[in-house]
Image: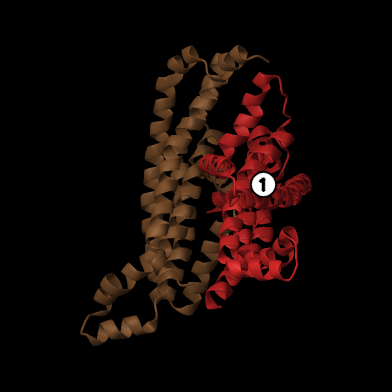
Chain colours: A brown, B red
C-alpha cells in the first residue's frame, strides 16, 4: 500500500468535488434536525421538571417510570418501532419526524432528570427568603430558584445534549438523507471511501465547537457546583 | 385500538420470535462483557496519558480522545466496516463493531476517569509514595480506588450507554438483539418483535438506570 493509492482511495479530490453538494445537503439536514431536537427536548424536559414540583406522589412515580424507560431503551429500537409500526395503524410519519420525535423524547427524559436534580439542590431557605421579601411563588421560581438551578445543570446538560444529538446519524438506518446517509450513498456510487472521510470531518466540524463550548461553560460556571 | 395491539403487542408473534431474540440477546451480552473491560482499560490508559509529563504525548492523547468523542458511534462503525476494506483490510461486521465501540467508549471512559483522578487530592499520592509504595502501586492501591468511587455513577451511566450502543451493530448485520427483532419484523410484517426486544433491553437496563440514579443521589448527599 503506497501513499498515492491511499490518497486516491480516501482523499480523492475529484470524488470529493462531485459529491460535495450531496454531503452539504446532508449536513444541512443533520444540523436542522439537531436544532429542532435540542430546542424541543430541552423545553419539554424543563416543563416536565417543573410539572414534577406540583404533581401528586403517584404522578411523580408515573413520570419517573416514563423517564427511566426512555433512558434505558436504545434509541434505534424506538426509531424502528415507530417507523415500521405506525403506518400499520394508520399513522404515516416521515423518517425525519420519526427521528425528531424519538430523540426529542429521549433528550427530554435526560433533561428532566438533570433539571430536577438542579431544582432539588437549591436549599429551601432560598424559596423562603424570596417569598418573605414579598415575591410570589412564580417570581421566586423564575427569578431566584431557576437561575441558580440552571448553573448547576449546565455541564451535565450540555454533555447529554451533544451525546443525544449525535444520534441523528441513526437516520441512515431508515433511509433519511442526513450526512451519514448521503456519504454511504456516495460511497456506493463512487466505489471510493472519500465521501465517508468527508462525512467524518463534517461531523467533527459540527460537534467539536459544541464540545468546546460545553467545556467553556463547565469551567466558567464551576462555582455553582455543589460538590 | 385493536389495530394498535395487533401491530405492537401481538403475543402470538412475540412467542414465535422469542427464541430468535434470545439468541440475539446472547450476542448483545457477549458484546457488553467484551467491550466494558476493554473500554475501561483503554480509557484508564488514556486518562493517565492525559496527565503525562511529556507535553507531546498529552496533546496527542487529547486530540485522539476529542476526535472519537466528536464522532457519532454509528459513523465510526460505518467507517471501520466500509472504509477500511479499501485498504485491503477485510473487517467482519462483529470485529468492526468491537473496534468502533471500543474506540468510542474508551474515549468517554477516559474523560470520566480523568475527572475521577483529578478529584483525588495530590497529597494522597505523596503520602502513599512517602510510605515507600512505588508509583504504580500507589496508583493502584491508593489513588485509583478513591477516584473510581468518586465517579462510580458516571462509570455506570456510561456502561449503560455502551450496552445501548451495541444495538447499532444491527445496522451492519451483526445478529444481536435488535437485529434479530428487526429481521423477525420484516418476516412477519408486524412490529411486535421490536416491542419485545425493547422490553428485553428494559429488563436489563431499567434496574441499571434506577441503580445509577441511586448512586448519583448518594454521591450528592455525601
The x, y position of residue B196, in whole percent, is: 67, 52
On screen, residue B7 versus residue A98, left or right, reads right
Q: Is residue A225 left or right of residue B149?
A: left
Relative vertical location of residue A151 with respect to residue A26 in this rendering, above or below: below
Q: Residue at x 58, y 52 (%)?
A: B51
Q: Position of residue A36 (x, y in %)?
A: 37, 45
**Is residue B15 in view from this perspective?**
yes
Q: Nearer the viewer, residue A95 or B38?
A: B38
Tell me the residue at 57%/45% (across/down). B58
Helix or strand or loop: what does disc 1 sit on? helix
Q: Residue at x 44, y 78 (%)?
A: A56
How many badges with numbers are in the image?
Answer: 1
Q: Which image quadrant for residue B204?
A: bottom right
Mark 1 crowd level (few <14, some 14–19, many ≥20, 10 Å Cα): many
Q: Quadrant of the N terminus of chain A?
A: top right
- Measured from the top left, where is residue A12 in percent x and y? 52, 15
The answer to whether any part of residue A84 appears in the image is no
A37, A126: nearer the viewer: A126
Q: Position of residue A115 (x, y in %)?
A: 42, 66
Q: Is residue A119 above or below residue A94?
A: below
Residue at horizontal 48 percent and vertical 79 percent from the top: A57
Which quadrant of the figure has residue B24? top right
Residue located farthest toward the left when viewing the structure as drawn: A134
Comparing A65 with A205, the one in front is: A205
Residue on which the image places disc 1: B193
Looking at the picture, tell me which residue is in the foreground, A14 or A215: A215
State which chain disc 1 sits on.
Answer: B
Amino acid at each position: 500500500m503506497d501513499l498515492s493509492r491511499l490518497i486516491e482511495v480516501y482523499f480523492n479530490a475529484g470524488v470529493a468535488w462531485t459529491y460535495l453538494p450531496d454531503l452539504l445537503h446532508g449536513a444541512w439536514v443533520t444540523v436542522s434536525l439537531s436544532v429542532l431536537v435540542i430546542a424541543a427536548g430541552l423545553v419539554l424536559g424543563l416543563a416536565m421538571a417543573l410539572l414534577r414540583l406540583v404533581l401528586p406522589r403517584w404522578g411523580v412515580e408515573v413520570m419517573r417510570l416514563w423517564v427511566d424507560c426512555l433512558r434505558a431503551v436504545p434509541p434505534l429500537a424506538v426509531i424502528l418501532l415507530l417507523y415500521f409500526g405506525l403506518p400499520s395503524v394508520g399513522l404515516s410519519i416521515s423518517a425525519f419526524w420519526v427521528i425528531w420525535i424519538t430523540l426529542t423524547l429521549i433528550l427530554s427524559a435526560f433533561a428532566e432528570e438533570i433539571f430536577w436534580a438542579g431544582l432539588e439542590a437549591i436549599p429551601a431557605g432560598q424559596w423562603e427568603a424570596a417569598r418573605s421579601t414579598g415575591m410570589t411563588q412564580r417570581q421566586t421560581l423564575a427569578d431566584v430558584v431557576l437561575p441558580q438551578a440552571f448553573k448547576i445543570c449546565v455541564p451535565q446538560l450540555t454533555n447529554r445534549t451533544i451525546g443525544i444529538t449525535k444520534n441523528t446519524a441513526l437516520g441512515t438506518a431508515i433511509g433519511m438523507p442526513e450526512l451519514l446517509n448521503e456519504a454511504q450513498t456516495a460511497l456506493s456510487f463512487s466505489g471510493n471511501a472519500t465521501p465517508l472521510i468527508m462525512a467524518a470531518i463534517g461531523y467533527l466540524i459540527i460537534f467539536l465547537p459544541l464540545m468546546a463550548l460545553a467545556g467553556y461553560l463547565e469551567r466558567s460556571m464551576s462555582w455553582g457546583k455543589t460538590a | 385500538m385493536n389495530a394498535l395491539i395487533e401491530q405492537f403487542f401481538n403475543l402470538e408473534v412475540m412467542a414465535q420470535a422469542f427464541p430468535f431474540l434470545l439468541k440475539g440477546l446472547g450476542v448483545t451480552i457477549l458484546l457488553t462483557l467484551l467491550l466494558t473491560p476493554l473500554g475501561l482499560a483503554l480509557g484508564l490508559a488514556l486518562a493517565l496519558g492525559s496527565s503525562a509529563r511529556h507535553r507531546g504525548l498529552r496533546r496527542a492523547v487529547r486530540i485522539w480522545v476529542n476526535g472519537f468523542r466528536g464522532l457519532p458511534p454509528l459513523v465510526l462503525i460505518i467507517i471501520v466496516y466500509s472504509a477500511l476494506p479499501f485498504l485491503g483490510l477485510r473487517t467482519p461486521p462483529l470485529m468492526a463493531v468491537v473496534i468502533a465501540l471500543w474506540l468510542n467508549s474508551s474515549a468517554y471512559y477516559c474523560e470520566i476517569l480523568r475527572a475521577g483522578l483529578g478529584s483525588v487530592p495530590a497529597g494522597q499520592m505523596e503520602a502513599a509514595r512517602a510510605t515507600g509504595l512505588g508509583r504504580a502501586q500507589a496508583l493502584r492501591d491508593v489513588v485509583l480506588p478513591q477516584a473510581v468511587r468518586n465517579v462510580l455513577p458516571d462509570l455506570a451511566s456510561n456502561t449503560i450507554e455502551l450496552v445501548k450502543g451495541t444495538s447499532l451493530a444491527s445496522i451492519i448485520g451483526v445478529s444481536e438483539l435488535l437485529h434479530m427483532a428487526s429481521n423477525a419484523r420484516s418476516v412477519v410484517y408486524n412490529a411486535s418483535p421490536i416491542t419485545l426486544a425493547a422490553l428485553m433491553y428494559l429488563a436489563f437496563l431499567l434496574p441499571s438506570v434506577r441503580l445509577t440514579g441511586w448512586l448519583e443521589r448518594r454521591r450528592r448527599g455525601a
